[in-house]
Amino acid sequence: MKRLPDLSEAEILALAVANEEEDSRIYATFAMRLRGLYPATAKLFDGMAEEEQDHKNQLLSLYRSKFGPELPYITRADVHGFLKRNPIWLAEDLRIEAVRRQAAEMEREAGAFYARAAERALDVDVRRLLGDLALIEGKHEERAEQLTETHLTENAKEAEAHTARRLFVLQVVQPGLAGLIDGSVSTLAPIFAAAFATQNSHDAFVVGLAASLGAGISMGLTEALSDDGEITGRGTPWLRGVVCGLMTALGGLGHTLPYLITDFWTATAVAALVVAIELIAIAWIRYRFMQTPFGSAIVQVVLGGLLVLATGIFIGSS
């Protein structure tokens, strides 16, 4: 790999051409991928792709006038100092905020490259164009704001925010909530049954640990295999599975860990307090993201949890 100071002016211009062409294609891909759910932002990236193409054409014209029609092949991968980009445009679940962050990083890197290249250029025309591009890229945030004003009206912003929230609920909140409910409620009976049957903290902890981890694996696989997300829009199945599985295990471990306390009755009192917190948390999540009235959510969740808890205590005490 070469260092930037080792490049000739012809190689610098060729590298700039390759950068602008790649950035334009990335922006065009963002626009294509986002057009269905975020049409206003897609127009923004269409504009950015067109601007990068214009930069490329300026660079090509200057290169042709200075060095002829033969363009050496060189890319950012051949030069030290460029960041390796995470190809988020290949992700199945393309998130709007990640796209905007990626675009900002691309513009910052491009501006820094042109500024450094302009400092090393000896040819007046090359130095002028690279300096102009450095200023343009450096002010690209202002250009993006202008594009935002053009394409992202208040109604469009609200619509895209609503879409992003809906996708977050479908892809993260729903599987996470399903796992938390299952882990918090379904493990109550075996854990407290074992606790009251043995009145031994260690035995209750072992049963709770097995039940929590087993439920997490089971729920994670069930969620991942339930659908591929293509039609329902629920996102990557394995992401949903991981979220659901982790939240299931977490829900069970919450009232399992208190049984690390050796005194049985103290451990049980702490576990009961944790159960109350878990049930209130579930009710709040349903209220916050699922538009379930908080009072109704409390009654439903707490009533169900108490019934399962009572079942475990009754069986364990019999």
Image (cartoon, rainbow, N blue to C red):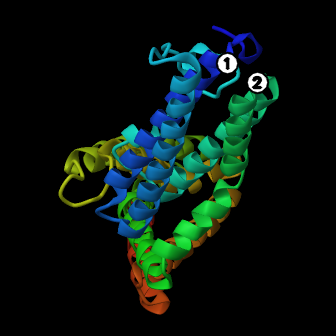
Residue 92 appears in the picture as rendered: yes
| The label number, if any, that marks residue 29 in the structure image | none
Residue 112 is situated, as x and y percent measured from the top left of the image, at 74, 37
Residue at x 45% of width, y 49% of height = 49
Closer to us: 310 or 54: 54
Disc 1 packing (10 Å; few <14; some 14–19; many ≥20): many
Is residue 315 shown above or below 297? above
Q: How many marks?
A: 2
Residue at x 70% of width, y 44% of height = 132
Q: Which residue is mark 1?
A: 9
Disc 2 packing (10 Å; few <14; some 14–19; many ≥20): some
Q: Label 1, label 2: how many angstroms apart (C-alpha)?
A: 6 Å
Quick one: quadrant of the C terminus? bottom left
> Residue flagged by tag 2: what amino acid is it?
Ala
**Helix, strand, or loop for circle 1?**
helix
**Helix, strand, or loop for circle 2?**
loop
Residue 219 is situated, as x and y percent measured from the top left of the image, at 33, 49
Residue 226 is situated, as x and y percent measured from the top left of the image, at 21, 50
CB-based contact (under 8 Å), mark 1 and mark 2: yes
Closer to us: 292 or 259: 292
Q: Which residue is mark 2?
A: 121
Q: Is residue 126 left or right of residue 240?
A: right
Residue at x 41% of width, y 69% of height = 40
Q: Is residue 44 left or right of residue 29?
A: right
For this orientation, the residue located farthest to the front is 65
Mark 1 or mark 2, which has the lower sequence index? 1
Residue at x 38% of width, y 64% of height = 167
Residue 16 is situated, as x and y percent measured from the top left of the image, at 58, 29
